[in-house]
Amino acid sequence: MIEFDNRRWEAELRQVSCLKQCRFPANSEIEIGGTLEQAKITMKEKGLNGNMQSDAAAFESWALALLLHCGVQTVQIGMDPRADRKGPHYERFLYRLKCFSELYPDWVIAEEPDPPSKALNSPNERLLNQPNKRAKPPEVDSNERMKAASGPTPSEADLELALEISSSFRSHFQLEKVMRQWPVGLFDGWVADGRQIFTGGKSGIDLIGIRNGTLVLFELKKSDNRKAGAISELLFYASVMRDAIGPSAIFEFESKEARKNCAIGPEDIIRCSNIHAVLLAPNFHPLISEPRIFQELNKAAMKRFGSDRQICFQTATISSYPQDGYGDFKFSTRQIKSA
């Protein structure tokens, strides 16, 4: 039986006509081996302790590429025994691996570590933090925000600030409330330094909205940020929020009330019954533009969750930006059905 490595899997992937420019990461970042019967992904220290969207960390994206485009039957996911296995990035990885293997029980074989994920096995309450109070309502700076987003090279922060007050954004996605930068720090027992399970600080969902009992999450990318790891980010945020809503929630918020000048509070999220996770960008990585991965995510989510805090995944394109500080954004949305 033929043994594959990163470059050989890449050649296999590029046989798909619309994926001819796709590249698997280097073996030094994440090791991808095995056979067509069972591929094996081995996480290196860089991926275990790094940004989710980086090539080294985005095991979900590479696993789905192997399964859906390379003809692989199952994928085993494990860790380099020499890698450092501690800290909030590593704990976040363990949670992601457990969620992903449960989403694909017939396809994904996760090497169970010892000790297991603290997020899913701590005897203490696991608490999510929430946004701090804000100095003023977002609408106060509407003109400045739209002007920054209309520049030649707006940053993702510029786009977030503008989308938070955009009427077309609310209208297109039918949002009753909108807020940027919702944190996803998870803490053991109480919210404080030294009690982190997941990374806190700058770790957060770019934008969230409420739509008739649905929590809508947005992972935002600007035009030069086309990473396959956006799939990993979207899966993680949707999983964390699903574990915080409904009667069987395993995560709680440190408090329920919204902070000053925050349009959304924990009680708004807790009342939601399902989640809509949207990747929003002007363009996408080829693995995302090709619809099979998002189709399969929706199929797997429907099979696993049914009507219990259902998660739906979708892509949406920013088709135009405000001009010279005037006007607004325009969007186009691709309806992705289960495969």
Image (cartoon, helix red, strand yellow):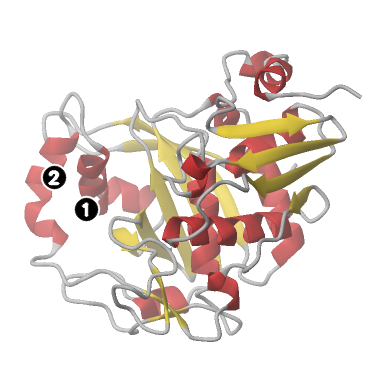
Of residues 302 and 196, the one nearer the viewer is 196
With respect to residue 29, does 2 lie above or below? above
Q: How many marks?
A: 2
In this rendering, position of residue 277 left or right of residue 303 = left
Res. 165 mark: 1
With respect to residue 46, does 137 lie above or below? below
Instruction: State the image coordinates of residue 88 (x, y, percent, origin top left).
Output: 43, 61
Q: Quadrant of the C terminus?
A: top right
Can residue 71 be seen from the camera position used here? yes
At 68% from the left edge and 13% from the top edge, which residue is drawn?
17
At 23% from the left edge and 39% from the top edge, which residue is drawn?
328
Could you tell me if the residues under marks 1 and 2 are in contact, i.e. CB atoms within 8 Å? yes
- SS class, disc 1: loop
Of residues 216 and 226, the one nearer the viewer is 226
Residue annotated with mark 2? 145
Q: How crowded is the residue under tag 2: few (<14 C-alpha within 10 Å), some, or many (20+)?
A: many
Instruction: State the image coordinates of residue 269 (x, y, percent, origin top left).
Output: 42, 73
